[in-house]
Image: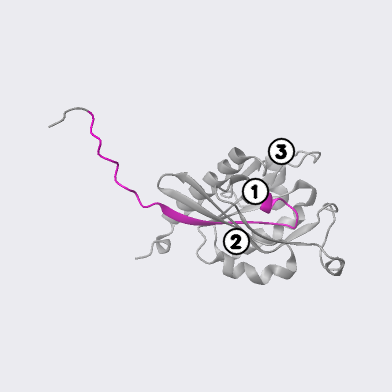
Amino acid sequence: MAFGRSSRKKPFVEPVTLKILVAGGFGVGKTTLVGAVSEIRPLRTEEILSEAGRPVDDLHGVETKTTTTVAMDFGRITLREDLVLYLFGTPGQDRFWFLWDELAQGALGAIVLADTRRLEDSFAAIDYFERRGIPFTVAVNCFEGARRFPAESVRGALDLDPEVELLMCDARDRESVKNVLVAVVQHALVLADRTPSAVTT
């Protein structure tokens, strides 16, 4: 018999998989956020903006944007050995809102990505999650050249409830995005613990 360090392998742990939505206005950085953090090649459904869509697509503040998400972005990240997040980026234009209800099914929580130059574009997503009782965290994407405002000023402008967390982030930076995802999961799990009906058998 050989003595010494055991070569026994650690038992396989089936990871818990959670669904997180990434929402916000048109051109706010949702596709960038999913791509920055995903450990797999993100699935993207982007199309080139056409002249036909200009009458219905509001390009104010994002005049240089040439593509748009028409269905969803999809990515995956392993936060821990036993915790995997599936990320679903929603389309930002009003004409694709009919897809939101399907994407939202089974979601633990959501990120509402905001741009301080166009905060009004965040209201629709915030209202959507509030009405459906889906926990969400607001992440302000700090674009280069955009004016920076204190978090409390942004919170007041968005009229957020006290329990909704607001964070500053860079949608291009993996660690910044991971911090937002951790905050969303923690927030959603805390709310689930407070709600008996959230526990299913």
Q: Where's residue 151, x and y in %?
A: 68, 40
Q: Residue furthest bottom?
A: 98
Rendered image quadrant of residue 23: bottom right
The quadrant of the image that shows the N terminus is top left
Task: Report the quarter where the C terminus lies.
Answer: bottom left
144 up-or-down from 2: above or below:
below
Left or right: 143 in relation to 195: right
Cα gap from disc 2 to disc 1, whole angstroms: 22 Å
Residue 64 on the magenta segment: no
As shown in the figure, which amino acid type bears the numbered disc 2? Glu
Where residue 147 appears, as percent x and y from the top left, is 80, 39
Q: Do the numbered discs 3 and 1 sit on residues whose CB atoms are within 8 Å?
A: no
**Distance in Å between CA atoms under marks 3 and 2:** 23 Å
Q: Which residue is mark 2?
A: 130
Which one is nearer the viewer's eye here, 70 or 160? 70
Give residue 150's mark: 3
Say which amino acid is labelled 1: Leu
Residue 124 locus on image (x, y percent)? 70, 62
